[in-house]
Image (cartoon, rainbow, N blue to C red):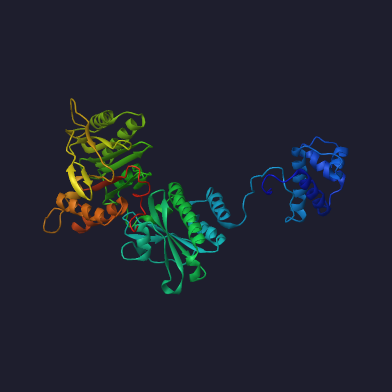
Amino acid sequence: MTGPAAGVPAEDRRARLRAALRHADLTLDQLWLRYFELGGNADLFDLEAHLDGLGCLPDLDGDLLAVVVNERLDELFAARRVPYSRPLRPPRPTTGPLAALLRLLDATRTAPPDRLAPLAAEAGRALGVDVSVHVVDHEQRELVRLPDGRAGTDPVAVDGTLPGRVFQSGQPLPSEAGGVPRLWVPLLDGADRMGVLEVRVATARDLEDPGLREQCRWLAAMVAHLVTAMGLHGDLLERTRRSRPRSPSAELVWQQLPPLTAASDTFVLAGSLEPSAAVGGDAFDYALTEHTVSMTVLDAVGHGLGAGLMAAAALAASRAARREGRGLHDQARAVDEVVATTFSGSAFVTGVLAELDLTSGLLRYVRAGHPPPLLLRSGRVVKELAGSGRVPLGLTVEGFSVAEEALEPGDWLALYTDGVTEARDGLGRWFGEQRLIEFLTRAVAAGQPPPETVRRLMHAVLDHQGGVLQDDASILLACWSAGEAGTTGPGTMDR
């Protein structure tokens, strides 16, 4: 039920009620009966007096009469309405962008993941466009179209293509390639990059419509969220994103990880693990609140499933302690205990556990037998955070301290495992810390946000060793902007 804004005089409402009754095909008795069924208290004589202007019913009773007549008009002449004494919430929309999104949301509540792409296409048709969903593979090298009942297409490279540029930058871009006008829109679940939405429109002029772009952005956000949510209920979405089979250790580790990218108004971080399909001992974790960010990078000794089990157990121990509200010292001791009591021999895990106060910029961290994090300021590495040096987690330790470092707005942090710097080319040359520093310096100078920097860095590490790493390599890259909302998100590269 809808009505104009509040403020319509009672006499005007009554006049329009009488006028509407002439079209509603209701006798006075039928009107009163429907009104009474809705809870009206006035008798038939009071109702007749109200209509004849000889009396005046309270606004609530007048609204009940409006409901009766409007429902009847909906049955007969939906265009004619009677105003109420106050504005009522509009009914569920049947057309337009909100209707399209609601239909998609409702349909996917009971749909298997296999139907996501066809349902997204149906929502697109409700907007007057034709859409296809392209998800990025786990190596973030290709965009693969989800099966939607149409003829398949070859994957699209992330590097060197317009759809790939949309994925990298987080900004929509138009295209008229092949004579087909399209809008490519990033699929962002929060800050996490899931792929791109291909939107085919009727004419090239439609690409200039800002309203259509905004509606497509809404649809892309909904689809990206559904890729994440529905992917938990089946294998199709996950299978589509895999370019190669995963080892059991990689399957275990990836199931424990948070999304690769997260952001708040003042903070953005991104992580990655390689080799994606065979990772064993590396893992990372993080948690964002209004005032703090927790970050963890771990590297379990060994390879394969044994290392994967140890990394998963260490990650679970630190996460459990953090979620109980315990500090960094207790989180480290929790990892010590679970590794020492669960894994025999000289098993251990190296790592960095850190917490940043977003109000003051104070970083507190524990470094246990792990490469020191790098601090970047004004586009260059200014310091290795080598404090709190203690033995690896899981080995006997009597006591250790939590180190501190004061960050400044715009600072970047790089937490990484030794697999990054120890990647070797065919001549045995290390990727090395200096190459890592140079890469990060160039990325910051080029304005690349953390997610894209991480993607390119891991590809550089893989390429350095011919695409096959001898050891796991992982990185967690973070940037704090101290109140400069929106300046560190995944879509800032081209601004």
Quadrant in which residue 368 is drawn = top left
Q: Work out whether residue 358 or residue 203 is closer to the camera in this orientation and state it.
A: 358
Q: Work out whether residue 81 or residue 324 is closer to the camera in this orientation and state it.
A: 81
Residue 335 vertical position relative to residue 6 in the rendered view, above or below: above
Q: Is residue 395 visible?
A: yes
Query: Is residue 62 shown left or right of residue 202?
Result: right
Q: How far across and down, in percent of the image, does residue 229 sit?
A: 45, 47
**Point 35% across, 52% down: residue:** 490
Residue 357 vertical position relative to residue 148 in the rendered view, above or below: above
Q: How far across and down, in percent of the image, does residue 299 sit?
A: 23, 41
Q: In the current view of this chain or complex, which residue is farthest to the bottom? A: 179
Q: In the current view of this chain or complex, which residue is farthest to the top? A: 398
Quadrant in which residue 294 is drawn = top left
Q: How far across and down, in percent of the image, does residue 476 sit?
A: 27, 45
Residue 337 vertical position relative to residue 153 in the rendered view, above or below: above
Q: Work out whether residue 209 or residue 16 is closer to the camera in this orientation and state it.
A: 16
**Point 76% across, 43% down: residue:** 10
Quadrant in which residue 348 is drawn = top left
Query: Is residue 33 shown left or right of residue 167?
Result: right
Q: How far across and down, in percent of the image, does residue 76 sit?
A: 77, 55
Q: Can residue 114 be seen in this view?
A: no
Q: In the current view of this chain or complex, which residue is farthest to the right? A: 45
Residue 182 vertical position relative to residue 299 in the rendered view, above or below: below
